[in-house]
Amino acid sequence: MTETRTSVTVTVNGRAVEAAPGELLIDVAERAGTYIPRFCYHPRMEPVGMCRMCLVEVEGPRGATLQPACYQHVNDGMVVTTDSPKAKKAQEGVLEFLLANHPLDCPVCDKGGECPLQDQTLTHGPGETRFVEEKRHFVKPIEIGPLVLLDRERCIQCARCTRFAAEVAGDTEIAFAGRGDLIEVAPSPEHPFTSVFSGNTVQICPVGALTAKPYRFAARPWDLDQVESTCTQCAVGCRLAVQSSGDRLTRVLGVDSDPVNHGWLCDKGRFTLDAVDGHGGLSDPLDPRARITSPLVRRDGTLVEATWGEALARAAELLRAAGEADGGVGVIGGAALTNESAYAWARVAREVLGTEHVDAQYGDGLDPRRVLALPGATIDDACAARVVLTLCGDPREELPVLFLRLRGALVRPGHDLVELAVGPSALHPLATVSIPVRPGEAHRVVDALLDEGRAPADLALDDDARERARRLLGDGEGVVVVAGRTNLAEDPSVVERALTRLADALPRARFLVALRRGNVRGAIDAGLAPGLRPGRVLAAGGRDTRAQLAALREGVQRAVLVLGDLVGNVIDRPGAEAALERADVVVVTGHGGATLAHADVVLPAAVQHERAGTVTNLEGRVTAVVPKVVAPGAAWPDVAIAAELARALGADLAMDSVVEAARAYESATGYPALSVLLDSTSEGRVAGSPSAPVARRPLDPMAFPGIRSAEWVGLGESAGDRSPPPRWPTSPRPRCPRCPDATPTASR
Amino acid sequence: MNRPGVYEVEMVKNTFRDLIYDPAFGGGVPGDRPVKAFIPGGVSAPWFGPDQLDLPLGQDEVGGQGSMLRSGSVVVLDDTTCLVRAAWRITKFFSRESCGQCTPCREGSGWIERAMYRLEHGGGRVEDLELLLDLCDNIAPGLTWPPQQTTICVLGPSIPSSVHAAIEMFKGEFLAHVDKQGCPFD
């Protein structure tokens, strides 16, 4: 029997280092404090050893040879020298080669100041070029997609972008074309680079070859100030760095959170900064892109600006009057708020307005009393699962980074996907078994899948697929069900019944409930759900959004407090408009929208990147959101609006700050809030899970590509002849047969 | 060659001189011009001079002298040949052959090719010789035999062979290109 080693010893520059067998040398050395320069290596992608920047000397049977540290798995007794004259010369040689065809247009390059090529040239490279020939030229830049521009002259062919597309996102829209020193990143001739993950290629590009349109020429990195926060565009809760120049948001970068996003973001999360400044100051309150910057009160049929005092008094008057009748008032919305704000509104509803009719979901989710009671799974659990069963919408559309994580697991051996295919899904090509499900039949298909005996003929269930799915699912051991609303036209009870059956038949399976709206899980936990008090304590009754809209139409309910844009988000828009038309409507929102056409009072709220608090992602992980800029005009954070409205209604929530709100929420629900709020760079905590200590990482998203940032380098020596170089004869360059005159291969 | 072609020879028994001059094989150099250099085994092999003509055709024998027999394609360069041009053409071939994956081969082959072109066509500088050798060293560290490499595959160390050999064996011809600012054979 061979002994399996759990640890090996490697000697790096004379120092012994412990490592796990098979670890990459570049990581082992870095952990031991020896930084090896690199370009192509990215810790979240497979190593390729292409750029050759990380060459180090490794002792071997034929003496010391140069090996790329990113491609070398360590083994016991390995002796490595990273700073020998031979290794240094190889590294400097590679850098000089990389710079030979690099345009050195750093003064006009967006990457200047945070550029790994610039930084590593200063630390590891020669100070002067020996290259006197003409560099290669391309038309620059070319638009390869709606958000990304490519400058092929700056490209150093590290393949990070093409590898991200192929390996992480599964996209085929960019790839290498050509060969030799004319090799170039080329967009697909048929499809522009419209991947919802395109922004990641810009972030991991180690030079300025890929730039994002929204940030081009918008700022210089040394002018930017940043905070670490959480994305609230969907329920995945990706960690990100929000950067601003002064009080102007300029850029969002992904931060590597091991349990959540691995540094990746979707383009929706990365490029929605326009929404925060109202697309440059749009002012029509019915335009969902506009920001509301002042309280508004309807007078003689039109919304006019008012003071906070007037607006709060009017809102209180309407809500109090409606509340006098039993069930006369309710609250809809709030899935985009922080936990503290949602908790404040839940208290306003229950304690001040005395109503149980609250629902953060716009009728597009599932009943939290049923689905959140199922045994829960984290994203990591789903990625480690032997079998993933999906009964949800297309995760790439609804929860994009969850798709990336699931895809990353499912492409590896030992992971199977059983798909209850309710529609086209980007996960479909990875499915081991795909069982088609027609709208309204999910519960019947699940029953037929799990029942003994023949499946009902009308379901057209394939016997072989059924048998393979049953074998894979077993008793649910190692199975994680990703469950979400599959279809907005069918009744949510279809999925809820299917999930209940799965939970009964697969007692060991766990469920990752993929409700998709920003902080919907947090809003439900905080008590913005019918029949669930803060902390998900079951309570009697309460109308959900659909029931509230029906009650409003029937006149049973007279007033509604809307948190967000109801009309713009609800499925039955005419039904919602008819309901609001009859009702007294108080809207608390940061943005305009169709709801405001029916509003009697509008209270302007701060939006993401303007407010502090915590949010809870779909797996129950609580992380902090941190304000970076000041809310425009008279907009307030929701916690303050809720406290003031309560005051206008004659109550005191005793929550005049986010810290007070977090403390009250934490003690009322038992969910973590204050500790997370006060440590905004942590990975967050999942309630009920043991909280493992997480090594604090410096917030340096540009270093996340695995390349050390500029802080470490000093200016290199520069010497020599400064006279202009003579013009040399240059050899006729071979041309790409597809573009003989070096015109752009794609220009749209 | 008077009789260029493909010949089957017995290993070790025959020498390069046999292969080049024997009427059964190459049949000698046209016009009986003297051999200036020859490439023993394909263009990725370091060059040999006339003093190595009596070397037997054997892997070990050729390997011991710092080159290789490998593809078995012997190229003979007579005294009418510009060695700078020959080395440039070979480098150009490799620069086109490079797949472009790894940096030293992708950029190094193109850079060496362009510097060689400049030497051959005027614009050469004395310091280019040192530069070329150093670029070669950055692809095949130490310029040893058998070669080491900074590249992924062995196409990398194939690039410096001809340039290194040409500079080592015919430095004067390079300097003549620099002096004349063009090719003395033109």
Image (spheres, grey):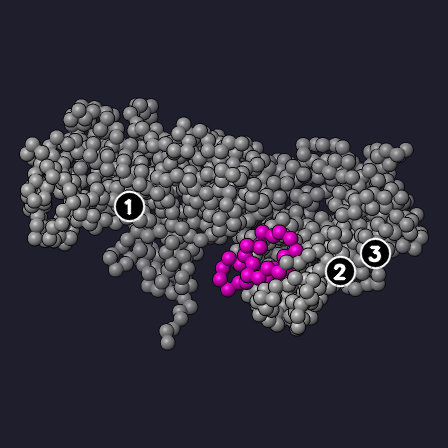
Q: Identify the subunit bearing mark 2.
A: A
Location of residue A122 in the rendering, given as x and y in whole percent from the top left corner:
39, 39
> Which of A89/A679 is in front?
A89
Location of residue A665 in the rendering, given as x and y in whole percent from the top left corner:
74, 57
Residue A371, which numbered label? none
Q: Is residue A23 above or below residue A630?
A: below
Q: Residues within 10 Å of mark 3 (few under 14, many from 20)?
A: many
Secondary structure category for the residue under label 1: helix
Real-space CA distance between mark 2 and mark 3, rounded to the nearest whole angstrom:
16 Å
Residue placed at 79% from the left, 47% from the top?
Answer: A572
Q: Quadrant of residue B123 in the image?
A: top left
Residue placed at 20% from the left, 49% from the top?
Answer: B70
The magenta stretch spans residue A428? yes
Q: Quadrant of residue A78 in the image?
A: bottom left
> Which residues lie in the magenta part?
A410-435
The amino acid type, in three-letter code, at marker 3 is Arg
The amino acid type, in three-letter code, at marker 2 is Ser
Residue placed at 20% from the left, 34% from the top?
Answer: B86
- Nearer the camera: disc 1 or disc 3: 1
Real-space CA distance between mark 1 and mark 3, rounded to the nearest whole angstrom:
73 Å
Location of residue A705 in the rendering, given as x and y in whole percent from the top left corner:
48, 47
Secondary structure category for the residue under label 2: helix
Label 3, on which residue?
A543
- Nearer the camera: disc 2 or disc 3: 2
The magenta stretch spans residue A19? no
Secondary structure category for the residue under label 3: loop
Label 1, on which residue?
B155
The amino acid type, in three-letter code, at marker 1 is Leu
Label 2, on which residue?
A493
Between discs 2 and 3, the one toward the N terminus:
2
Q: Residues within 10 Å of mark 2 (few under 14, many from 20)?
A: some
Check if mark 1 and mark 3 are on a common chain. no
